[in-house]
């Protein structure tokens, strides 16, 4: 049947995180005890006031089409959120509501990329970035980073990577999978490089904005380089901070011309996001971040347990993160001592099959020799998982 498939499908790989989760579920269905540390999903409930708003929307019959780009009320809430929390000013016409940040990015690449356009992606990166770029005929250009550089690119790296074909740069801070966040000083330095290249669009993925415990508060590149506003898309959503992954609401704000093009793409694909979810997202944003703080406190406590615990495992090295709910330990020392396990992909498979712990190989994120471990689960589960890992690695 492959003769019926489009050529573009040869360049696209399925999501590694979802593949691991599916395999873990398969083993679980066969009766094997599996602890999943693979999925980036908060283990908390959506806040009650958000759920109540959605229930009221259903009861009031708000169950029909809305405007393609989102309800006026939600767009106003997004504009106010940017002003209140990020000191960024947008008009409603500069905002597009979509079915998650992934959808926002997909719309952006559809609107921006021509065949052969290059998009610079700091590595390690979220698994979907290069695949979406490739889907639209673009060329993902990965910029490798290291544990020693705290997985962040330098201005020199960025300057050397930009070519005549460069169309975009993706910035994700705090980062999935590393948990590292750029400081204002670091973003300012990157911004100075970008100012010399006016044809490069910046796509800032801020979905983990509020899951942050670093010494410095969250900062967006536009806060330190406002001159880039005419070619910067800021993307965010309610999935991570408000434990609303299943509600599927993300949004993008930026130059009116780009947002309008993304609107056109969305109008011919999904049309509007779910009406009920939009009401819930509006309630979440209008309520502020007080309900987020207990979740962040719990994630920080888990982080403070998991990082030293991983560093006690043979051949593992893990740096403290600035936020998110991921650890990204290097396992290169372990692999060098165990030649029978050829790489992080094989190690992740063995950990799943023999230790019963699901993690994602770093190669899927452009960081071979590492593992991504999600600590978006309870402390007792994490302790049990670490003990299973310790026993397997010891034997």
Image (spheres, rainbow, N blue to C red):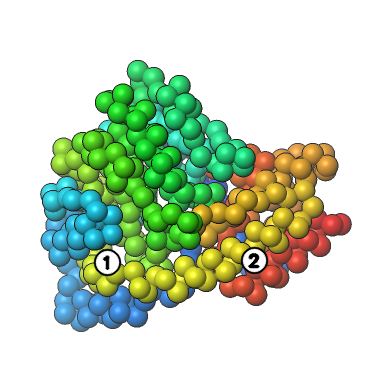
Locate residue 389 relative to residue 212 in the image: left or right. right
Number of other residues with Cα within 10 Å of mark 2, as a class: few under 14, some 14 to 19, many 20 or more: some
- Foreground disc of the pair 2, 1: 2
Q: Is residue 120 visible?
A: yes
* Vertical relation: 94 (above or below) 243: above
Query: Measuring 27% from the left and 26% from the top, which residue is drawn there?
Result: 198
Q: Residue 345 occupies which quadrant of the picture?
A: top right
* Vertical relation: 315 (above or below) 45: above
Q: Position of residue 55 (x, y in %)?
A: 26, 79
Q: Position of residue 344 (x, y in %)?
A: 69, 44
* Vertical relation: 69 (above or below) 287: above
Query: Measuring 30% from the left and 33% from the top, which residue is drawn there?
Result: 201
Query: Measuring 45% from the left and 21% from the top, which residue is drawn there?
Result: 160
Query: Measuring 83% from the left and 42% from the top, which residue is drawn there?
Result: 337
**Res. 285 mark:** 1
Locate residue 337 relative to residue 166 in the image: left or right. right
Pointers 2 and 1 in contact (C-beta within 8 Å)? no
According to the picture, the residue beneath numbered tag 2 turns out to be 305
Report the front residue among 360 and 137. 360
């Amino acid at each position: 049947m492959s003769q019926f498939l489009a050529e573009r499908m040869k360049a696209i790989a399925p999501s590694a995180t979802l593949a691991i989760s599916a395999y873990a579920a398969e083993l679980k269905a066969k009766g094997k005890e599996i602890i999943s540390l693979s999925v980036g999903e908060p283990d908390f409930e959506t806040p009650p006031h958000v759920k109540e708003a959605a229930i009221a929307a259903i009861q009031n019959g708000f169950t029909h089409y809305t405007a393609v780009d989102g309800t006026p009320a939600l767009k106003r809430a997004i504009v106010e959120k940017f002003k209140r929390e990020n000191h960024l000013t947008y008009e409603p016409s500069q905002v597009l509501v979509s079915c998650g940040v992934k959808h926002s990015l997909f719309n952006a690449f559809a609107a921006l990329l021509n065949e052969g356009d290059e998009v610079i992606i700091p590595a390690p990166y979220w698994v979907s970035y290069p695949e979406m770029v490739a889907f639209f005929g673009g060329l993902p250009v990965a910029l490798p980073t290291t544990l020693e550089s705290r997985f962040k690119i330098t201005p020199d790296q960025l300057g050397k990577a930009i070519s005549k074909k460069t169309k975009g740069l993706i910035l994700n801070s705090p980062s999935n999978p590393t948990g590292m966040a750029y400081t204002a000083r670091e973003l300012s330095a990157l911004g100075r490089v970008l100012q010399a290249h006016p044809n490069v669009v910046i796509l800032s993925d801020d979905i983990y904005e509020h899951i942050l415990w670093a010494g410095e508060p969250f900062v967006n590149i536009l806060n330190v380089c406002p001159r880039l506003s005419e070619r910067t898309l800021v993307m965010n959503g309610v999935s991570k901070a408000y434990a609303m992954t299943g509600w599927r609401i993300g949004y993008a704000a930026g130059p009116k011309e780009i947002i309008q093009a993304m609107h056109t793409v969305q109008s011919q694909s999904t049309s509007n996001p779910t009406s009920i979810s939009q009401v819930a997202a509006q309630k979440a944003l209008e309520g502020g971040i007080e309900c987020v703080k207990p979740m962040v406190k719990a994630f920080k406590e888990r982080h403070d347990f998991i990082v030293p615990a991983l560093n006690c495992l043979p051949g593992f090295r893990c740096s403290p993160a600035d936020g998110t709910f991921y650890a990204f330990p290097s396992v290169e020392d372990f692999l060098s001592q165990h030649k029978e396990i050829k790489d992080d992909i094989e190690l992740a498979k063995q950990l799943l099959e023999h230790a019963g712990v699901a993690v994602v190989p770093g190669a899927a994120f452009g960081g071979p020799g590492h593992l991504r471990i999600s600590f978006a689960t309870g402390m007792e589960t994490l302790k049990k998982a670490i003990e299973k890992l310790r026993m397997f690695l010891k034997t």
